[in-house]
Image: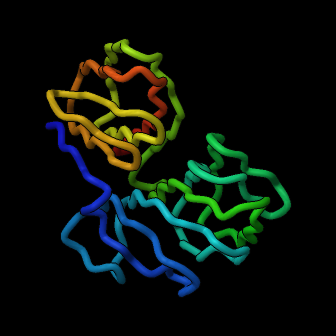
Amino acid sequence: MIQLLKSSTYQRMPWKNGLGVTDQIDLAPAEIKSSQPYAWRLSSALVTASNPFSIFEGYDRLLSVIEGDGLMLNQNPLLPLQVCEFSGDDHTDCQLIGSPVRDLGLIFNPKTHRARMQFHTLPAVSESVMSLKEEIHFFFVVQGKMRLDGQTAQVQDCFKLIRETQIKIQNTASETLGYYQISLSPI
């Protein structure tokens, strides 16, 4: 199954610590309420000020800066397009390096899922055929447009793929396509 998730349909949610909001892209299981435990949550947030991160006990986190200068997390730099993994149990202090940033984050239960997040590029007017192993994949666009299965994702749109074994990603534009591949597999 291939589903295009448009940024205009993401659900805006308050941060657990009340200091901002996040755009929730997807959540599993989808029918739960925000106060209940979940297996994983993919979201993107605008960070406009330095602040402590919310604590998510029992979860691990993957985080990347997709716009802006970067963050300092507990005095360690997280620069654009790098991916950081850390425990949701940790007290994490977040300082802006410069301008506000937009991040992409995955919070997941390491007892139920393995997860990866990687940044990729695809040259202008080209395509890539990929074999997929994990059960769930997201392809989040940060630059250009991605064409997949006859649908086109723009910047901050996301494809969700479930149990697809082979796909063909197309970049029909005259600029480089930049995207994150987020993969989840049950343990």
Q: Quadrant of the N terminus?
A: top left
Q: Nearer the viewer, residue 165 or 111?
A: 165
- Residue 136 shows in this picture: no
Q: Nearer the viewer, residue 6 or 137?
A: 6
Residue at 31 percent across and 62 percent down: it is: 27
Residue at 47 percent across and 42 percent down: it is: 142
Q: Quadrant of the C terminus?
A: top left
* Rendered location of residue 121, percent (x, y): 50, 25
Give above or below for 22 relative to 108: below
Residue at 37 percent across and 14 percent down: it is: 125
State left or right for residue 3 relative to residue 42.
left
- Residue 60 shows in this picture: yes
Give above or below for 97 relative to 81: below
State left or right for residue 186 relative to residue 74.
left
Give above or below for 115 relative to 96: above
* Rendered location of residue 141, percent (x, y): 41, 40
Q: Residue furthest bottom?
A: 18
